Structure formats: C-alpha cells, structure tokens
C-alpha cells in the first residue's frame, strides 16, 4: 500500500490541486460529510451532509467553494439557515441542491437567484413555500424540478407557477393528485364490484354444491361405468359394421369378376350361375351391412348420451369438491378488494377534507 | 495510509482507467459514455429490489393479453396497459418502465434465483456475488454507521417456490454480506445496546484479541473484527432509528398498508433515507401452480398499494431520481392460467433511478394460440439485465475482479449488452 499512498498523495496534488482543498475536505469529513465524484466526469463533485445533522451550521460551509466544482450539495436535516445560503449561492456550478428538513424560508430562497445551472431543488419540509418559488423560479433558467411537502403548497400558487413556467415540475401537484385519487377510487370500486360478483358465484357454489359431494361421488362412478359400457358396445358394433362393409366390398369384387367371365363366355351356364349366386350373396351382405350400420349409429347415440352425462356429472363433482377452495380464494380476493377500495375512499376523503 | 472517502481504491482504479495515472485509456469512461450518451449521472444510485419469490405471472400483472383472465387497464402513458388489478400503479406509469422481454433459459427455482441475482449460471466450483453485495461493494459507503445492504423478509403466502436463495458476497468479502431483517415491524431485535458496560466489555474483548489479530493478520480475522465493529457502530448510531417503524407518522404507515409487504416497503424507504445503499425485500409465495388468477387477485391490492405509495413517497421527497426500484421474480409463468414456470418470455419492472421511465422495453406476441409465449422485440437475458442494473446504479459492469485463488472474474458476463433504452 505504500507506493499506492504515494501516488494517491500525488494524485491529490494533481486533482484537488492545493493543500487548502485538502483542509476543506478534512473539515467536511470531520462534520460527518462525504465528498464524492460524480461519475464519468471526475472533476465534478458531490458534497453530502445529509447525515451530519446539527453539526453543519451556516459558518461551516463557508469554504465549500474552495473544494472544486460542486454539482450536487446535500444539506438535508442540517442546521442551515437563510444566512448559510449566501455560501451556497457562490457554488455557481450547482445542478442539484437538497435542503429538505431545514429552516430555509422564502426570504433566504431568493439568495439562490444566481445559480444559473440549477436543475433540481428539494425543499421538502423546509420553511419555504411555493410563494417563494414563484418569485425565485423565473430567475433560474434551467430549473426543472422542485419538491415540497403538501403543507407547503396551495393549488392557486402552483397553477400560477405552471402557467408562468410550463417547463418546471413542482411536487406535489394538487391538481394532478386529485385526478389520480379520483381515478384510483373509481377503478378500486370497479374491482370491488367484480370481486363481489366472483364471491357471489363462489358462495352459491359452496352452499349448493359442496353438500352434494358425497352424493355425487357414487353417481359419477355409475355414470363412468355406464359410459364405459356404452363405449365398449359402440366399439364392437362399429367393428361388426366395418366387417360387414368389407364383406360387401369383397363380394362385389368377386361378382364383378364372375360377371366379366360370364360375359366373355356367354355359352357357359356354370359361370352365369356362379355370378348370379355371388350377386345374391352380395345383396344379402348389403342388407346385413345396412342393418349393422344402423345398430352402430344407435349405439353411438346412446354412448354420446352416456358420455355427456358422465362429463356433466364429473364437471359438477369437480366444481362441488373445489367449491370450498374457490370460496376461500374468493373470500381472500374480496377482502383484498375491500381493503383497496377502503384505502381509496379514505384517500379521497382526506383530499376533500383539505 | 490516510484514506479519505474521496480516494478509495476504486476511485484510484477509475482514475488510472481514465488514463490519469498510466496514460493508457481503458474502457470504463468510454463505455459509460457510449451507454449513457454524454449525460452525467450522480454516482452510486441506491436500489430497492422487490423480489417476488417463486415467479410472478406476467399475464396477471404487467403484460396483459387479449383473452386473458384479467382485463387490461390503460395507464397514464398512452399505449401501455397493465391488468385491472393494479389501478394505483397504473397512475404511476410515468415513473415506471417495464422490461417485457426477459428471457432467461432456466426454469428451475433455485438455479434461476441464483442466475437472476448474480448474472451467472450456478456452478459447483465458484460462488458469484449477488447484486446486493455488488452494490454494497461499489456503491455503499465504507466504514459507515449503517450497513450498505439490508434484506427484509416480507412474509410467505401459500405455495412453495423451492429452496430460498440468500445473497452471498462471495469473493467481495464478508463485509458485503446483507444484514437480514426478519420482520419489518420488529426491525432489528438485538439492536439496543446493553447499558451495563457493553463498551467496557467490548474494550476488554478488543484487548484480548489485539495480539492475535496482529500476529495472524488474515482476511478472516479482519472480517470478524470488522463485522463486530459494524454491529457496535450501528448500535450507537442515531441513524439506526430508521429500523423502527414506530417513528413514522400513522398516516404514512397507513398509506403503505398494514400488510407485511407494505411495512417492508416503508422500512426500505427509511433505510435508504438513512444511508443504506441496497435493500432487498423478498416476498415468498408467487409459485402459483394451481392457477395464478384468483391468487394474484388477492395479492394485487396490497402490492399495488405499497408499491405505488413507495414510488409516490420517494417522488414527493425528491428521492426518486436517486433510488431505483426493481420488481421481479426468478422467471414468469406460462401464458394463460399461469400454472407453470416460464423463463422464455416474462416481465420485470424498474421505477425511478433517473432512468427513462414511462416506457415498455421489449414485447411479446399478441396473437396465436398462446399469446405472450414468444418475444417479438428486444430480448433481455439475465446477464443483459445485470449489466443494465449495474450501469444504472453507477457500477462499471465490465470491470474485472479477483476471485479467490487469484482468478480474474468479470463483474458481469462479457457478452452482456446494456439495455440502452433505459438510460438517457
């Protein structure tokens, strides 16, 4: 670490340039403050006093400008007063200034008029109000973002500011906040209504179907067995019909052969007889096939009925046996939706109470 | 050596990287410039990671699909919809960004948790540091009263979600292990110093250990002493009050909600305010194998309330630019009912942090049999996500570190590409 410390010392000389700077740095740190580089551009600094508390008073920050170009300064919860802002005003490169929970008032705020690079100003829970900002903001061309607590602003002044400086965003925005709360209330009520309708169905199912679980179980089993039986029957009828169909095709082919042979030899009575016999057999097989096809159709129909019954009963059984769980879930959903709506109503009420 | 905060080792490295010391230009500033244009960002953003353990369903949260179980709800940004269960977050869309094209290859809970926390696949011979520990090492303030990395247990719904992943600092050193808060309402239970001579006894202990520490100057000895010292510093610090939610006004506690998750979010804000750099809140029970619909419907209201309040609260306090909020799990769930694990196309969310919010990066398909099962735009892998997260927090993802045994390890996989859409 020895050579490193040597280089660091050298570095100190190069970047912070003078021993006085180091004295200031030491002073900042003795107050519990931190100095960091803003990344990507190491000459710009961030000075952070947000955990120093009352150790930081107006006089303590007088030498900050000697430290280098400070872009970010955090003075949250320090003992800074308006008098201290004259030192802050000398940090003309400042882009972000944090003055939350300080005693800064509207009078002190006007000292910042020279910070032409300032983009961000945090006055949350400070003594200053939107009135002070209305006076200051037109002098700060780059200011984009300012933060207050809702106690520090009025709708009238905020709307004046946004009229004058449309590029500046100030929090809280009472108008936008109202719109947000109203939208949230409306949507939460919709969600609540939906949760209630889900609950109604779940409750009905639970009350009507859940007691039927025991009774449904044997009925489902019977229906299953019946459906299996009709399925088997239909299958075997289908097979018979298929065999009969094949027999018809086979006999038709044989008859065609015999007929062709008989036509080729018109004198051969034997061949004629054979063809006639085959035709008779074919016709017989055809009528048998029709009969079996009809039987197959009938079996299919009764199987369809049995399957439908089985499915319906199974669905009902599933719904009945799940109804308790669904009911519990619907209860949880409704409770959550109620809570959401309740919060939204309270928020709405608080807004209107102001 | 006279170490000032201003001149830490990493600054020294950065300066040398910038060519100030060696005269050689090394990529950190260039890559920062490439990734971020020429825009300056304050170094060291803080981060609140909302970890939905088990894998939340994207279709039931932030990537609604036509014909889905939940209807879609327009947000304050035209063209971006969420599901109807998130009315409050829908009003915060201008401060949020969705990453709808997460694609992460691992469908197993534990391996995916490891992958998404570290940016590396789990291997047997090396442990990788988790993002919280990385932030502790590179964003956290050394020798600060407050711990840099805190985890908060926001409770457990039904559902398993596999083995729980605990953040490990690995080769970054035990100093960067998280301080674990078991219950947000109870804070740190053993924090109150014993007034009957604790300091005296600690002094005695210190004397006893002094010689050993001098003679055996090993990392593990130093780590043990450092951990002890940190605990004692924290006990004596007035900033430790941040751990106690009773100090918060009732109205604000109510806005965050009575649910343990809401309390965790409030605690996270208090901790970030008091100097903690990285807070991970984990809520277990998003492994909805029996259908995500009704379960998320019951979970959404408290999540919606707490998260939107966190965003609005940070925003009003002017802190949102400095704090990144990340909402994610280890993967998403199958399109439709959300019954199964689904790592191919899912959604994570980032809010605040000074990034380009009010947008949805990436997209999944809307048509077909399973809308949402394919990425149609800008896939984001786990290393891409990690590189993006590091860059937003102000950590160079391309730097190389020394793992144990002198093994050089990149902080993030070298093939990772930063999601530049999120960064100015």
Image (cartoon, rainbow, N blue to C red):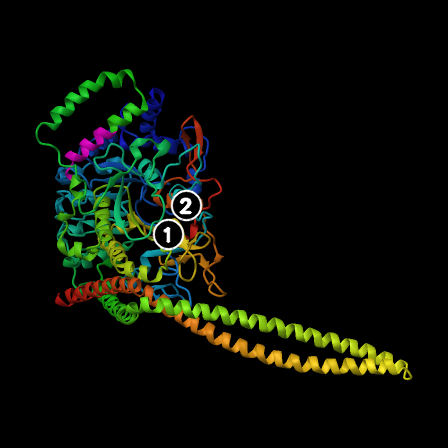
Q: For residue A337, what is the image quadrant?
A: bottom left
Rendered residue at 20%/56% (across/down): B257
Q: Position of residue B100 (x, y in %)?
A: 42, 56
State which quadrant residue B97 falls in. Answer: bottom left
Magenta span covers which residues?
B227-238
Front residue of this view, candidates B133 and B54:
B54
Find out whether the residues at labels 2 and 1 contact each other: C-beta distance under 8 Å. yes
If you read the primary sequence from the N terminus, does the residue marked by circle 2 or circle 1 appear first? 1
Left/right placement of residue B351 relative to residue B372 reads left
Q: Quadrant of the C terminus of chain A?
A: bottom left
Residue at (40%, 59%) from the top-left corner?
B338
Label 2 to label 1: alpha-carbon separation: 10 Å
Crowding at label 1, few (<14), some or many (≥20) Cα neighbours within 10 Å?
many
Q: Give the answer, above or below, for where B23 lies relative to B119.
A: above
Name, please, the residue furthest toward the left: B196
**Which residue is at the front of the view, B73 or A182?**
B73
Residue B356 is inside the magenta segment: no
Residue A190 placement (x, y as % from top left): 27, 70
Q: Which residue is mark 1?
A: B55
Q: Which residue is mark 2?
A: B112
Residue B65, numbered circle: none
Q: Main secondary structure of the magenta part?
A: helix
């Amino acid at each position: 670490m020895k050579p490193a410390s040597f280089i660091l010392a050298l570095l100190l000389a190069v970047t912070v340039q003078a021993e006085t700077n180091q004295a200031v740095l030491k002073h900042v740190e003795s107050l519990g403050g931190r100095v960091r580089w803003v990344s990507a551009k190491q000459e710009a600094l961030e000075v952070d006093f947000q955990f120093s508390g009352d150790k930081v008073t107006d006089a303590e920050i007088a030498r900050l400008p000697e430290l280098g170009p400070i872009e970010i300064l955090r003075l949250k919860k320090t003992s800074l007063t308006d008098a201290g802002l004259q030192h802050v005003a000398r940090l003309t490169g400042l882009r972000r200034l944090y003055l939350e929970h300080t005693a800064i008032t509207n009078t002190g705020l006007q000292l910042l008029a020279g910070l032409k690079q300032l983009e961000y100003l945090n006055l949350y829970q400070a003594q200053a109000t939107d009135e002070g900002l209305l006076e200051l903001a037109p002098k700060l061309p780059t200011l984009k973002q300012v933060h207050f607590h809702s106690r520090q602003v009025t709708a009238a002044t905020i709307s004046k500011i946004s009229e004058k400086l449309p590029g500046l965003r100030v929090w809280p925005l009472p108008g936008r906040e109202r719109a947000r709360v109203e939208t949230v209330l409306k949507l939460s009520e919709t969600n609540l209504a939906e949760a209630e309708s889900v609950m109604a169905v779940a409750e009905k199912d639970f009350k009507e179907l859940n007691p039927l679980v025991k009774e449904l179980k044997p009925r489902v089993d019977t229906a299953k067995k019946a459906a299996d039986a009709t399925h088997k029957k239909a299958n075997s009828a289908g097979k018979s019909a298929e065999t009969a169909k094949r027999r018809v095709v086979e006999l038709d082919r044989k008859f065609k052969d015999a007929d062709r042979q008989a036509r080729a030899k018109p004198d051969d009575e034997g061949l004629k007889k054979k063809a006639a016999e085959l035709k008779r057999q074919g016709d017989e097989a055809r009528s048998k096939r029709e009969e079996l096809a009809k039987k197959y159709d009938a079996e299919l129909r009764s199987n369809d009925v049995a399957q439908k019954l089985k499915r319906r009963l199974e669905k009902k059984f599933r719904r009945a046996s799940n109804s308790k769980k669904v009911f519990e879930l619907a209860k949880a959903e409704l409770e959550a939706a109620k809570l959401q709506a309740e919060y939204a109503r309270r928020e709405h009420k608080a807004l209107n109470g102001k | 050596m006279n170490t000032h905060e201003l001149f830490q080792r990493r600054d020294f490295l950065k300066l040398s990287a910038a060519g100030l010391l060696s005269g050689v230009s090394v990529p950190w500033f260039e890559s920062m410039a490439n990734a971020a244009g020429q825009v300056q960002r304050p170094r060291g953003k803080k981060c609140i990671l909302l970890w939905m353990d088990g894998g939340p369903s994207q279709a039931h949260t932030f990537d609604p699909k036509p014909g889905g179980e939940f209807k879609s709800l327009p947000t304050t940004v035209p063209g971006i919809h969420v599901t109807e269960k998130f009315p409050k977050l829908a009003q915060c869309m201008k401060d949020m960004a969705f990453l709808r094209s997460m694609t992460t290859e691992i469908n197993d809970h534990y391996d995916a948790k490891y992958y998404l926390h570290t940016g590396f696949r789990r291997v047997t011979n090396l442990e990788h540091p988790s993002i919280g520990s990385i932030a502790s090492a590179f964003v956290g303030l050394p020798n600060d009263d407050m711990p840099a990395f805190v985890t908060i247990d926001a409770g457990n719904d039904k559902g398993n979600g596999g083995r729980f992943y605990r953040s490990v600092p690995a080769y970054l050193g035990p100093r960067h292990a998280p301080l674990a808060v078991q219950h947000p309402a109870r804070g740190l239970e053993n924090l109150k110093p014993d007034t009957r001579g604790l300091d005296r006894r600690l002094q005695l202990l210190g004397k006893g250990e002094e010689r050993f520490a001098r003679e055996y100057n090993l990392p593990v000895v130093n780590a043990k002493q450092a951990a002890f010292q940190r605990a004692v510093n924290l006990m004596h610090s007035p900033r430790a009050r941040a751990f106690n939610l009773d100090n918060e006004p009732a109205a604000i506690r109510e806005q965050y909600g009575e649910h343990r998750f809401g309390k965790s979010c409030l605690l996270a804000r208090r901790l970030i305010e008091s100097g903690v750099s990285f807070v991970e809140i984990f809520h277990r029970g998003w492994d909805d194998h029996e259908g995500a619909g009704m379960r998320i419907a019951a979970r959404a209201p408290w999540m919606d309330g707490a998260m939107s309040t966190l965003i609005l609260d940070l925003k009003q306090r002017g802190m949102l630019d400095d704090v990144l909020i990340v909402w994610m799990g280890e993967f998403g769930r199958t399109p439709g009912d959300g019954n199964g694990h689904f790592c191919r196309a899912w959604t994570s969310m980032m809010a605040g942090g000074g990034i380009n919010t009010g947008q949805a990066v990436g997209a999944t398909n809307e048509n077909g049999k399973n809308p949402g099962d394919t990425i149609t735009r800008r896939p984001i892998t786990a290393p891409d996500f990690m590189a993006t997260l590091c860059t937003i927090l102000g950590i160079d993802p391309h730097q190389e570190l020394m793992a144990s045994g002198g093994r050089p390890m990149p902080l993030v996989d070298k093939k990772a590409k930063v999601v530049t859409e999120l960064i100015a």
